Image: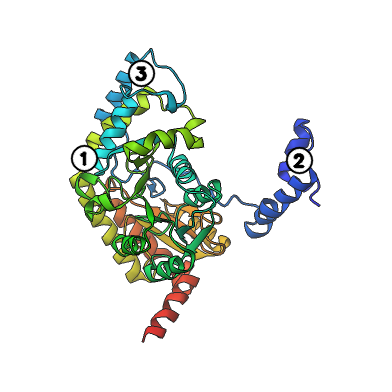
Amino acid sequence: MQTMENSPILSSVAQRGDPAISDHLAQRIQRDYTDRFDKLWGGRPLLNGRNPSSNSVRLNGNDYLGITGNPEIVQAQISALKNDTNFVIQSSVFLHNEHPVRSLEHRLAQWLGKEDGLICQSGYAANVGLIQSIADEKTPIYIDTLAHASLWEGARAARATAYAFRHNDAAHLDRMMAKHGAGLVVVDSVYSTTGAMCPLIDILEITEKHNSMILVDESHSLGTHGPQGAGLCVALGISHRVHFITASLAKAFAGRAGYFTVSAAMRRYIVMTSFPTIFSSCLLPHEIAGLDATLNVIKKCDAERARLTQISRRLRANLSAMGYPVHQGTEQIIALEAGTEPDAMDLRDFLEDRDVFGAIFCAPATSRNRAMVRLTLSSALTDAEIDHVEEVAAEIVHLVNPQQWPIARRQAVQQACEV
């Protein structure tokens, strides 16, 4: 078992004079973290490398439209902080229809082509709370293998049986639903690790064939895709066929909240059964005012959306030409999937040494041995910054050998089989 002497966590507990943790927890820390830290990472933090400088190109955020600091949004927040002095911090279940939260919920719903919705503390809370309310142990839940962790956690909170279907594989979903029966299908519109777009029409047709419900998480397409940024469901004209649309408002909205659509008739039921809604306080007035102003800004961001699409296509094409296997996605999220965690750390260090900062993704955010450096693009990136990223990628290609990454070898085998 892990001893106090060779565990930094346990040693810290001992030095502070805190009560000793249980042997079982100590063993879990040893198994799940300490061994990983010492053996795989060589005693270095996996998620944190160098600190970026003012000259660094930051590709590790989610502000896809570059709206942080927008004067219209900032002014709305300042005004709310100065003037909304009579608000009561309470659970959102107690809010009346006259409350600004309800006004924003209706505005978002109308934008998405739906009737009503509910604002939550986060996208994670939105997914967990919604699924917990609409599924139970008698509801099979069919989840794409790359769906966000909050969607899997929602299935667990609902005590439902979750069936994973192969990523973006409607035929596999069809076979699984034929075997296990009608239930709830759960997908992301744009997947958060790879930037792959869901074949929503195909998935929706299978869902309808089996008389089931569908939940589409639009966290990485809301604001960036569709007319006025209303997302892929609106762009495809299928909002009226989708039962539930969810989204984090910490991506293109650059805020701190989550949202899901629901019919007006079901909303009271959701409010009374969704634990994250019941047991969390509502957002503060300046947060709601900021999000409301952000919605106005996002609707006017057609130029930024076009710019984001243009630089996403450019960087993907040029990385691919250099030999980087980025074929698994198409949108503004680019996965450089090195494979093992040490290989991902080396890739991160080579990039950061040259002032390009992405974000390390590893288990549990990815499958084991599918660690990556995720690059997220923003319309605010300049041509000079994109030039620099491409120059760095070309400079280090012989150091990281992307043609030898497991994902590149799998692609080569697949292409050979197809031939």
Taking 34 as reference, is 122 above or below it? above
Judging by the rendered image, the residue that carries numbered circle 2 is 11
Q: Which of 406 and 297 is in front in this view?
A: 297
Q: Are marks 3 and 2 in contact (CB under 8 Å)?
A: no
Taking 76 as reference, is 186 above or below it? below
Q: Which residue is drawn at 45% across and 67% down?
A: 166
The kind of residue tagged 2 is Ser
- Residue 255 appears in the rendering: no
The kind of residue tagged 3 is Leu
Horizontal placement of 379 versus 369: left or right? Answer: left
Q: Quadrant of residue 236?
A: bottom left
- Residue 306 appears in the rendering: yes
Q: How far across and how far down the image is residue 374, in percent?
A: 43, 55
In the image, which disc is placed on residue 299?
Answer: 1
- For the residues labelled 2 and 1, the Cα–Cα distance comes to 52 Å
Q: In which quarter of the image is residue 116?
A: top left
- Packing grade of label 3 (10 A; few <14, some 14-19, many >=20) is some
Judging by the rendered image, the residue that carries numbered circle 3 is 81
Indicate which disc, 3 or 2, sits on the residue closer to the N terminus. Answer: 2
Q: From the viewer's perspective, is the residue at label 3 or at label 2 nearer?
A: 3
